[in-house]
Amino acid sequence: MWPIGRGDRKFWIAVVVLSAMVAAGFYAYIYQLQRGLWVTGLNQKVSWGFYIINCVFFIGISYGGAMTSAILRLTNAKWRAPLTRLAEATAVAALLVGAVYPIIDLGRPDRALHLLLYPQVGSPIVWDLVAVSTYLVASFVFLYLPLIPDLAMCRDTLGPSAGRVRRTIYRVLALGWRGEPRQERSLARGIGIMAVLIIPLAVSVHSVLAWLFAVTARGGWHSTIFAPLFVLAAMLSGVAAVILVVAALRKVYGLQEFITAKHFRYLSYLLIALGVGYLYFMVSEYLTEAYVLERSTTPVLEAIFEGVYAPAFWVFTVGGLVLPLVVAALPGRFAIARACTGSALIIGGMWLKRFLIVVPGMAEPVMPWDWGRYAPTWVEVTITIGSAAAIPLLLIVFFRFFPAMSVHEMEEVEGAELRRTSMVPAFAGGGDE
Amino acid sequence: MSKVRRLAAVCGLSLIVSLLLAGVAVAADQRAVLFLETRPSAKPEQGYVLAARLVATDGRPVNEATVRFYDLVEFFGAREMLIGSATTDGQGIATLTYLPAQLGPRAIVAKFAGRAGVAATEGRASLAATVAAQPYTVEPAPLSAFSSKVPYAVGAIVLAVWALIGFALIGTARGVMTGARKEGKGQTA
């Protein structure tokens, strides 16, 4: 059990291991910054690679987390209570990581400021910045508002061992919450507005990301269905990420009493619905393109279906989409294990899918040249691993200071008399150390 | 030996003849003079007429000669910007209409590169441009009237979204804090 309070041994081991991975990624970035982009596999023909793939991938995961929470809130799903905080925190952590990637992709990161100093309103990149920054702020607010009652709980129940600074932070952020009806109404209204707002915001972010590709005249990118395809892909990978995060923290924090197989079954239903929807959109895209076989699209389709990218495509389609859906849909026991297996496969598959979108579209020659080639270097791989490690690091550090589940919401929605001490034991004892 | 002498004499004679012929050829490249003048075009919007007259030193006009016209400009240093070329007529006159890109004094150069019998030459003239080409304007793209308004519409939506986020955050904070104060007063009373 890792309660709120000072870290135990497992916590510090996890922090050290993850921090080392993040530090390795940071070192690789400094190395790239000092020497330039030639240390990556990016080149004149394939100038988008791992960094843009990761940007789309991590922002997609963020989107799925926010959407999961928002949809469950708006549909008033009773089983949502133990999951919403985890989904919202995952959304913020993944977004913080994903939003950094466009800057990593720049050989001269200082020139990112030019987007603000000399914006071209006709450029999708400017609107991408606007959408991502708006979504980031909204995600923070969406995470913070439901946290207010729990912050008040921390303020009231944490003992002196929490330290003056932390108690002051809890007191300030709790805004004097006492659970009065007037306060409840204000909070419910604020959360309701954000739950409604976060959905179109998240859709807009991923649509703008899709349009960065779709408004170009490149084969495999110039597709009218790209925006909804990206949105569905983001939701699918996001829900899969939420399942994995929930399963991991359930195990680590010992939340089996509150997060049961039922929650995983319901999340699996959501995963299956999104997966089937994505499969339909993907077939629709490829079918229309492969039937018309436009001059710019045909080489890309050939490369994907039967060329150099065919292994990645078929591994994604079978192993990363169809198989996980079947695994998640199977009836019977081991719902949690099946949900986690399916989710892990989907996350891997959706990363491959982003690779299949970005790289072949770039590698196809638009001039009478040879095909471009792209192979990532250790710099890109290390930065990718480091950034992936940053998400669990941010989550475990965050949940070291704030409750992993919304206690207030669980009491409200499930009407359960929760044993707060069992959820956050340090509250009662003033720390477990 | 006499054969050798004869051969040497023939070679020497050939050399002398060749030199003489070459001298005649060189002497055949007559010097020419290029007179350049500029004047406003009959249609003011067309700019100026650059008229170059190419005459040999004996006063005869040189026809069918290509004359190139340059505008001396400052572009990373002094450079000759080619305006265009024209061919001289029976009077030895080549004309070109030129609409400068900028107003003000300009130096124009006309150059004749030379040809068999006529040596290369050039002439210069100044031009005080009071008429210049209109700045380049982009032709309106299809749907431009519509697309030019789209950023404003999207910008308005973004502002509305930020206002809603602000309302949700500040409104909730105010509501919670007000509720806390009222509760505090109630407890005091």
Image (tube, rainbow, N blue to C red):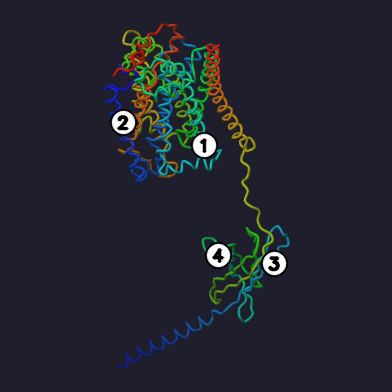
Q: Are marks 4 and 1 on the same chain?
A: no
Amino acid type at circle 1 is Val
Amino acid type at circle 2 is Ser
Q: Tell whether label 3 touches label 2 (CB within 8 Å).
A: no
Q: Which quarter of the picture shows residue A22? A: top left
Q: Tell whether label 3 touches label 4 (CB within 8 Å).
A: no
Q: Tell whether label 1 touches label 3 (CB within 8 Å).
A: no
Give the left or right position of residue A192, taking residue A384 as reference: right
Amino acid type at circle 3 is Arg
Q: Which residue is mark 1?
A: A126
Q: Are marks 3 and 1 on the same chain?
A: no
User: What whole-number distance in Å separates the C-alpha atoms at marks 4 and 3?
Assistant: 20 Å
- Name the subunit of mark 3: B
Where is residue A359? Give x, y as percent: 39, 35
Amino acid type at circle 4 is Glu
User: What whole-number distance in Å separates the C-alpha atoms at marks 2 and 1?
Assistant: 32 Å
Front position in the image: A337 or A119: A119
Q: Which residue is mark 4?
A: B80
Front position in the image: A3 or A118: A3
